[in-house]
Image: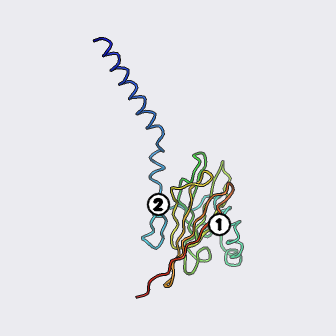
Amino acid sequence: MRRVWQVAALLWLLSIVVIVCADAQKPPRSLDARPTVFVPDDENRGLKNANPPSDAILNALLATSEAKEAHNELSGLNREDLRDLFEVVRVNLGPADEEDYVVHGTSLPMKGAENDWFWIVRNNRGHSEVVLFANGYSLELLKRMTSGYRDIRTVWSAPAYTLTDIYHFDGVRYEHTHRFTRTNRTP
């Protein structure tokens, strides 16, 4: 009888260890709560708790080809006015030791006339770098991963067709890998 109790106690203890280990494998709840879908025209979905960019992120954005092409429009703005052109949301793209952000351009010249502009910025130990610029009506961080980072999908639509673009991380930056075109039905 004593042996039965010892086996039962051992099994109970083993089940506690298994539960604790399984719980430790789950990502922190704060990462699960971060948005993964960004649709500015849908009640600002994913961007409701956005902040202005930090100095490091703003510097990285201003070094992009999009900012350089808008140099004439941007040159007369002070730093705070430049900061107002963007909104930033912290996201989780992959490695836990990096801070990742989705940046949305809020107004011209850092926003398209018929679409939204998005940047993905990685901040590793205080160094911010833009690893993707994409435009569209929405941007989504997918569960599927490439090279340790989430794949990204953007969607843009016109009356005649819808474009869906997929981006994969190549170890340095995101690369455009697929484009799907769907013809929209006209009434």
Residue receiving disc 2: 49
Residue 79: where, in percent of width, then height?
A: 65, 66
Q: Which amino acid does label 2 sit on?
A: Asn
At label 2, counting other C-alpha atoms closer than 10 Å, the crowd grade (few under 14, some 14-19, many 20 or more) is few
Q: What residue type is labelled 1?
A: Arg
Residue 98: where, in percent of width, then height?
A: 61, 49
Q: Residue farthest to the bottom?
A: 187
The residue located at (49%, 59%) in the rendering is 36
Secondary structure beneath disc 1? helix
Does residue 83 appear to the left or right of 64 in the view shown? Answer: left
The residue located at (60%, 61%) in the rendering is 120
The residue located at (51%, 63%) in the rendering is 140
Residue receiving disc 1: 79
Question: Is residue 38 something that shows in the picture?
Answer: yes
Secondary structure beneath disc 2? loop
In the rendered structure, which disc, 1 or 2, sits on the residue that comes first in sequence? 2
The residue located at (51%, 70%) in the rendering is 138
Q: Residue farthest to the left?
A: 1
Q: Residue farthest to the top?
A: 2
Q: Which of 107 and 80 is in front in this view?
A: 107
Mark 1–mark 2 Cα distance, whole angstroms, equals: 22 Å
Check the image and report above or below for 186 versus 104: below
